[in-house]
Image (cartoon, grey):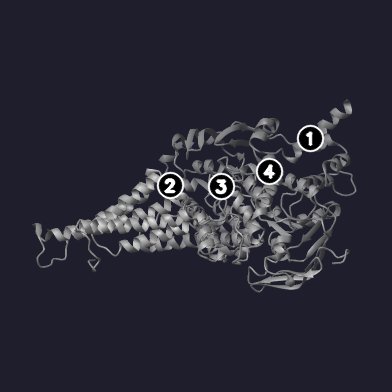
Amino acid sequence: MSLHEVNPSIKAFAIVISILILSLFFDPITPLVTILWSLTLTFLFGRVSFKKWLLLFAPFLFIALIYVWTTMLFPRLQEGDTVLWQWGFLTLTAEGFQRGVSLGLRVLSFATLSIMFTLTTKPTDFLLSLMQQCKLPPKLAYGIMAGYLFLPVIKEEFQTLQNAHRVRGVARAKTIPEKVQQLKRYVIPLLAGAIRKAERTALAMESKGFTGEKNRIFYREITVSRIDWLFFILMISAVILSAFISWKLGYLQFYNREL
Amino acid sequence: MSPFEPQIKANGLGFSYEDSNIFTGLTFSIEKNQSVLLLGPSGSGKSTLAYCLNKLYPEAVDGELKGSLTFEGQTLDDFKPGELNQKIGIVFQDPESQFCMLTVEEEVAFGLENFHVPRSQMEAKINTALEMVGLLAEKRTTIHTMSGGQKQKLALACVLALQPEVIILDEPTANLDPLSSTELVETIARLNKEHPFTLIVIEHKLNDWIELIDRCLVLDSSGGILFDGSPEQCFGEFAPYLQKEGIWLPKVVEVGMTAKSAGLFKGERLPLCNDELLSGLENTAAFFKKEIKTITKKDSILEVNSISARGYLKNINLRIQQGELTALVGANGSGKTTLSKCLAGLYPLTQGEIHFKGLPLSKWREKDLFQALGYVFQNPEHQFITDSVYEEITFGMEDKSRVTALLEKMGLEKHAGAHPFSLSQGQKRRLSVATMLVHEQDLLILDEPTFGQDANTAYEIMRVLDEKNGAVFMITHDMELVDQYADTVHVLDKGEIIFTGTPESLWEKHEVVNRARLKLPFRKQLQNEIVRREIHVAT
């Protein structure tokens, strides 16, 4: 059993619902347990390289740390808060500390769930599944697919453009008006190139008889089986269980506009 | 449909787009299983016409179609959207922008899905189509990892899977190296023999196609029909007119023309194949007398000492000599563009050093470097930085007295006020070369300067480069250019230089030519043919 084989639409649905449930609560334990659960899943059943995972996770960790830091040190002081430490205008309260940690872990729980999806789902599979299970119009789905294939090309084009302008002797832009001028110089050829490529691809797709018609017979059928729903139930139960554990430990709190 | 009805029939066909006529009043018909070569100067609407035939146009653009067009006796309006595309397939020029799926089998399946082929039959159809073009082993390969030649074969397989009656090829070999081009043409010729279909070919490089074609349809620059008839008549009698329109000729015709004007060819019409050329030549020895360029030992302007870069180029050594034209050749993906960018200091090196005019590239100030060294990119649009042709040329120029002369030299004097992006493909290319001649750079590096150009522009560019003082270094797939203009040629294969020498000595090295997916130039092929015959006669 591998996460790659789970139906992409159901996987996405399970993760969206899990995130929605998580956002009802605001305590450190619920997201923490969920994080541990999704990490276990990702690395036991996802065949995910740790390096790749870390690369995606690092930015979220950074954001989370900043959140924790600011919420901890600049808390909204309320009557009856326990002050742990005070220095000048900086005040650390027990309540502020808990809020900060809750917020950080909340961000990280959303991140680990989303990364689990991204690293175990092929974009083509996801789009095929969205068309087959969720009735996404083929016009949109294949459009997204073609656009996705363009991204590396546009990046390459941008680098070539920079080099081409260096050769022409365009000095590196320093002031703001210069930068605006430079942006204009880049945008026109990039857009012209992108539009032309898009037109060509569209024409090629039409030449193969693509009309955007909704009833298609798909070469690769993305199926839904009982295992997919089992995964769904498992995911939701795990989040609810996390909340239950938190409640048992006496931490559970509903979200009440703390932010 | 009556048995005498042609498969495709156009009557007074015209197409206009944004108030300008692309072509008007075209009347022609195409019989079933005919192979038609569609010729015309750039901008004459060849591709537009092809897209009209299978109803991609005018739907896809805001254009207006006039006149009548029928397929098997039925007017095109009667076909439902997409319906005609199963009967008329098309392979486009650019291998990079005609796919929308990730893997080979998915891409072939895409067409089948569009036509509601039952899933149980898809696998077999995909396999058959891939087998036909020799790509069955690549069934699960990711498309973007394949070579240009493979991609074009895949595009052909996608079309073949739908079992069309007509196949249109819109410059299918434009982006391919010489050997891949020949292979693609051979594949098409073989398939056409096994399962006859109507073939409509738009192409610049005609050498390989000429034997496959049984009819030529030529458009002129104003969008009318210049010629419609047999290839023998088209090239044999009308070649000078075609040449005047800037239409590429098969090399054998071109050579025949030169021979005829020199009084060496006595055939009634110009030759279409080597046999005809050779039997019409009076004195083969006189014809092949090639001027041997006197090579004097010159100073090198750029020296590359065992550089490695980008994780691909390995231990490259080369020298560019003052006043020489150096060519860099090799297969698609052999690293030619990467190497040329390293020479211009645009890519960092992981190892080794490049000296330009005796100074390491790293020691040059960027501004000074690019006044002494020019680089013309493959896509001219990348290099345009101003809003008019005039400003484009005067950018960074102190002495503006030479502008007019330069504009005239490049045939751009009438367009001085135009926006660079509004120029035609040929004009854009000439402008991008002109901007690099401004500082009279000592070394000019060009990445496929004649790519996609009509015969006249290509000739003009090569003439300018040939006359230019200082050294020229260019990447090309065109062995005729190498044979005709280059003093030295370097062959790149998988990131390594495997040959350096004169073109003449390269043609003798068959293993290098094959390994780097090159081809012999026409002159050399012909010489070999003569030698073979003499041996044959002698035995």
Q: How crowded is mark 4: few (under 14 residues within 10 Å), some or many (20 or more)?
A: some
In the figure, residue B330 lies in which quadrant? top right
Chain letter for the residue marked with disc 2 in the picture: B
**A23, A160: nearer the viewer:** A23
How far apart are labels 2 and 3 at the CA level? 39 Å
Residue, disc 1: B527
How far apart are labels 3 and 1 at the CA level? 42 Å
Please state the horizontal and vertical placement of residue B404, each as a whole percent of the image.
59, 59
Which element is circle 3 on? loop
Which element is circle 2 on? helix
**B493, A49: nearer the viewer:** A49
Q: Do labels 1 and 4 share a chain?
A: yes
Residues at discs 1 and 4 in contact (Cβ within 8 Å):
no
How far apart are labels 4 and 3 at the CA level? 16 Å
Q: Which amino acid does label 4 sit on?
A: Gly
Which quadrant of the figure contains the C terminus of chain A?
A: bottom left
Which element is circle 4 on? loop
Point out which mark residue B366 bears.
2
How far apart are labels 4 and 2 at the CA level? 48 Å
Chain letter for the residue marked with disc 1 in the picture: B
Q: Which amino acid does label 2 sit on?
A: Glu
Left-right relation of B200 to A112: right
